[in-house]
Amino acid sequence: MVQCCVSLARVIKPGRQVAVVAADVFCLRDGAEIHTATALASIAMLDDAKGAKHNDAKYHDAKQKSPA
């Protein structure tokens, strides 16, 4: 039976536009730590103004295309 899980995350390569990150999940089972999962991801860095403008444009386009 799994007693608890712990996730350890780290930044592999920081960047202004894209960052590469990784995470490992370990579960404690019968007193032993077992490596359960690994994740590797790239994350786009958006500033608040650019992200808000991008999302508003998507919403506006979708609303225009949907039937009334």
Image (tube, grey):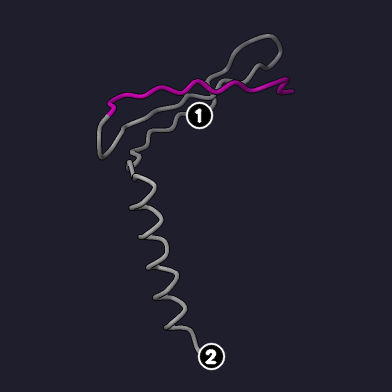
Looking at the picture, which amino acid does disc 1 mark?
Answer: Ala
Residue 2 belongs to the span the image colors magenta: yes
Residue 1 picture location, percent across and down: 74, 23
Magenta-highlighted residues: 1-14
Residue 10 in the image: above or below residue 20: above
Q: Nearer the viewer, residue 5 or 16?
A: 16
- Residue under the image location 33 percent in, 38 percent down: 42
Residue position marked by numbered label 2 in the rendering? 68
* Helix, strand or loop for disc 1: strand
User: Given the current orientation, which residue lies at the most extreme front position?
Assistant: 49
Image position of 25 (left or right of 55)? right
Residue 43 picture location, percent across and down: 35, 40
Residue 61 picture location, percent across and down: 39, 75
Q: Nearer the viewer, residue 44 or 51?
A: 51
Residue 14 position by quadrant: top left
Question: Counting other residues with Cα less than 10 Å from the Cα at mark 1, is it few (<14), some (14-19), or many (20 or more)?
Answer: few
* Helix, strand or loop for disc 2: loop
Residue 5 picture location, percent across and down: 63, 23
Q: Main structural element of the magenta stretch: helix, strand or loop?
A: strand
Residue position marked by numbered label 1 in the rendering? 37
Which circle, 2 or 1, is nearer the viewer? 2
Looking at the picture, which amino acid does disc 2 mark?
Answer: Ala
